[in-house]
Image (spheres, rainbow, N blue to C red):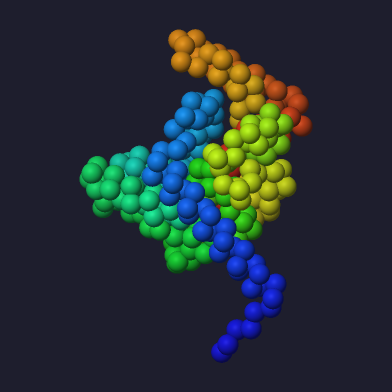
Amino acid sequence: MTTIHSPQDLASDTAAAERYAREQVFHDHTFGEDARAGVGKFYSATARSYDQYAAAVRRAPVGAAILEYGCGPGSLAFDLGRAGYDVTGIDISPVAIEQATQRAADEGLSERVRFVVMNAEAMTLDDDSFDVVCGSGIIHHLDIDRALSEISRVLRPGGRAVFVEPLAHNPGLRAFRALTPKLRTPDEHPLTMSDLDDFQRRFPGATVSFHALFTLGAMAAYGRRAFPAVLARLESLDDATFRRLPWLRRWAWMTVLEGRVGP
């Protein structure tokens, strides 16, 4: 049977293909040249959000099947493999997958951890095949509706989606992003509060936490002995602020999302 596509469908398919190509070229360059190494220190202010994300993933029983969605050169996959999980990592960047596969071989983890070049919006993976789908800074590179549909599709009943993502609303961060366009692709879009609502609709009962507002100020002490203490105090200030003034949550830098597929 021949499928007849409308002009709108064809335009959408072409636009998506062009977007995928841009993302692949950008990330091949980024991973191949380690092009974001200079901004790594700024993410030290968001360490607690990544710790919460990793802890949520590790609540799965040992031996669970975990998909790292947009894995880059490996991210969490290696720690999960060493802990006894069965991990598949996918990424649109062949360079990232090559690097991750080599590292898995070098560390003797090829039995537990495998990496595949794949489009996260159209995965060639079976339905109901993973206990956890997780990712760090990936959803905001994608068509969110397509991504959430695919994540839901490959999760087993009762399976969990766990992600840590940047938010869009903080005016200071928006200015920084505008001033540093070479650090990101033209298609990425930090999440909005509306996007968080979409996640909660897709995964009823999902939890959303907010991180890194005042902690950005800890960068003034970065590299000094006082940095951990300054960061801890500012994290406490963030917690109190988000609790007492919930409207400021939208100005957080990072969010951790955790949802479950029914029942």
Q: In the picture provided, is 204 more to the left or to the right than 138?
A: right
- Identify the image quadrant of the C terminus: bottom right
Q: Position of residue 2 (x, y in %)?
A: 58, 87
Residue drawn 52% across the image and 53% down it: 23
Quick one: 48 or 192, which is closer to the camera? 192
Q: In the picture provided, is 21 more to the left or to the right than 12?
A: left
Residue drawn 54% across the image and 32% down it: 49
| Residue 183 found in image quarter | top right
Q: In the picture provided, is 105 more to the left or to the right than 124?
A: left
Q: Position of residue 224 (x, y in %)?
A: 47, 11
Residue drawn 74% across the image and 24% down it: 244
**Residue 245 drawn above or below residue 174:** above
**Residue 142 drawn above or below residue 242:** below
Q: As drawn, which residue projects farthest toward the bottom?
A: 1
Quick one: 108 or 98, which is closer to the camera? 98
- Identify the image quadrant of the N terminus: bottom right
For residue 262, say whether it is visible.
no
Q: Position of residue 187 (x, y in %)?
A: 61, 51
